[in-house]
Image (tube, rainbow, N blue to C red):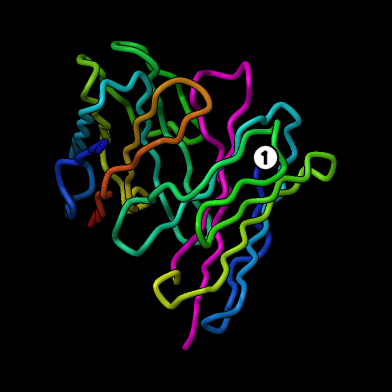
Amino acid sequence: DVKVTQSSRYLVKRTGEKVFLECVQDMDHENMFWYRQDPGLGLRLIYFSYDVKMKEKGDIPEGYSVSREKKERFSLILESASTNQTSMYLCASSLIHNTEAFFGQGTRLTVV
Amino acid sequence: DQQVKQNSPSLSVQEGRISILNCDYTNSMFDYFLWYKKYPAEGPTFLISISSIKDKNEDGRFTVFLNKSAKHLSLHIVPSQPGDSAVYFCAASAKGSTLGRLYFGRGTQLTVWP
């Protein structure tokens, strides 16, 4: 079974902190994604990566950066956390086009 | 601009009856469609998919129908069970796009009551 693991289920951080969310997948997938889910807004794509060291902005990249140094690991970085970044963060991975993406269990981040 | 739209934020159905969740899309380049199910505090799980070369795909109680001319797809759950209560997301990907990117709708909260 494909496994996508996010490092934390719940996080509480202070405004202005630098926050790292880690994601690891074990199926040698090329693509990895970071989404955030907010009530009424669905899943919004923050960043994605289709290869090591490659990244593409999604729909809402402002205030975030990413790192993919190894194929299995994709990190989301909140450079300076703000309260409007309180959300559920979801990592996903997939093979190439026309295949399903597999999601991690999510990280509920609260910025106070 | 949302390219995948789920216009019903919620649906309530009695156990044993059919649940029909709808999804519309605007991008004619979409050629692969998926449905995901999400429980609170968990990640979405893949449910069923359909390629644009088909108009129907069935898996147990779940059937997805695709109407390309109307740019519409629907998910049928028969019979509905209380454990089906979750948020359902419709998603699509486009041929020729950056590999593997999925575009999601905003979700429909399905509640199945006994």
Q: Which residue is mark 1?
A: B3
Q: Residue at x 25, y 56 (%)?
A: A110
Quarter occupied by residue A79: top left
**In-front residue for pair A83/B99:** B99
Q: Chain of mark 1?
A: B
Quarter occupied by residue B41: bottom left
Q: Is residue A96 above or below residue B59?
A: above
Magenta span has B48? no
Q: Percent position (x, y) of residue B28?
A: 76, 30
For the N terminus of chain B, the image quarter is top right
Q: Is residue A10 above or below residue A64?
A: below
Q: Amino acid at mark 1?
A: Gln
Q: Is residue A73 left or right of residue B3?
A: left
Span shown in magenta: B86-114
Q: Residue at x 20, y 31 (%)?
A: A24
Mark 1, secondary structure of its residue: loop
Decide: few, some or many residues near mark 1? Use Cα within 10 Å; few <14, some 14-19, many ≥20.
Answer: some
Figure label count: 1
Magenta span has B102? yes
Q: Percent position (x, y) of residue A81?
A: 26, 42
Q: Percent position (x, y) of residue A52?
A: 29, 12
Q: Percent position (x, y) of residue A65?
A: 32, 26
Q: Is residue A71 left or right of residue B4?
A: left
Work out which residue is located at the far right of the displayed protein and give it.
B69
Work out which residue is located at the far bottom of the displayed protein and give it.
B114
